[in-house]
Image (cartoon, rainbow, N blue to C red):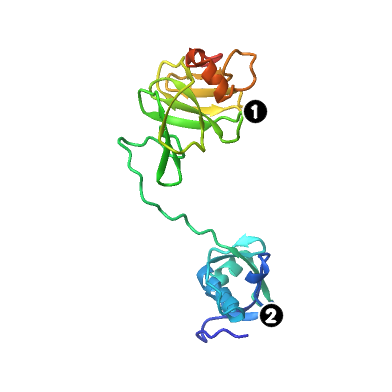
Amino acid sequence: MDMGTDEKVKRVQVRFITHLEDQFKVPSNAIAVPSDLTRLGLSSIVNNLLKAVNPDWVSEPFDFLINGELVRMSLEEFLLAKGISAERILEIEYIKAVVPRKEEEPCLHDDWVSAIDGSNPRIWKGAETCTHMLKGHSDALTSLCMINVKGSDSCNILHVATASKDRTVRLWQFDAEDARNLTTITAYKVLRGHSAAVQCVSSQKSGKMVCAGSWDSTINLWQTSLFDDDDDDFASIKKRKRVASSVRHNQRPKLYLH
């Protein structure tokens, strides 16, 4: 099969292969294609071949690999850069291209947002539904991390640590699926000890401790257990309700690193 092109443009013999499902596979015979094709041109050829087999085929973008390396230039440039001969049949693997995320309508806040990836004081489900508001910090948030909790009652229960310019780290617990109404959550534990804004917070993989770095030039470490220091796990929301008078307490760090 010969693809029509300008006679001055060199052509190379290629065979398209893929490990995708059968409906994505094109005939395995070699074809001649212009050497100046880039990813978009190659994608157009593959879609035309698929449409020849299936008239109802809907075109979609593909990425291409030669010897396991993504092609991000023309075929000719790639072959020259990699020292690959254009005299032999070139096997080109194609895969589904990663389509850029579509920008959705913005959701306005009543104040500026200090960070992304959930590190603002609101929890969103999808692009439009705000389910929880984390209330308690008196200054802007600077960092957020998820805490891995063993023994939690439900996989829907999320445990979050936030750091703020108010010099505190706060621990939160809420049901991510409880999205019927906007719910205001208060921290069940306030971790104090820094004398300046807390810039970042991170959780130990086991979830037993969090550490925070501050502009006071120290790193502080705290245990995340809800009750005493010997309690390895967080208590459930039900338990927390039974001891509401004791959970929202201030706690000093276990260790200071200067």
How far, Cα to Cα, is label 2 from label 1? 55 Å
Above or below, 119 against 25 in this view is above
Q: Identify the residue shown where x is 68% and y is 65%.
A: 19
Callout 1: SS = loop
User: What is the residue that sits farthest to the left in this orientation?
Assistant: 110
The three-letter amino acid code for the residue at tag 2 is Asn
Please provide percent x and percent y for residue 180: 44, 38
- Where does label 2 land, which residue? 29
Please provide percent x and percent y for residue 5: 52, 84
Please provide percent x and percent y for residue 176: 51, 36
Q: Identify the residue shown where x is 55% and y is 77%.
A: 56
Nearer to the camera, 104 or 63:
104
Asked whether, in this view, residue 252 is left or right of residue 134, the answer is right
Above or below, 248 against 48 in this view is above
Q: Is residue 241 in view?
A: yes
Callout 2: SS = loop
Asked whether, in this view, residue 242 is left or right of residue 123, the answer is right
Tell me the tag on residue 150: 1
Above or below, 60 against 182 in this view is below
Q: Residues within 10 Å of mark 1 (few under 14, many from 20)?
A: few
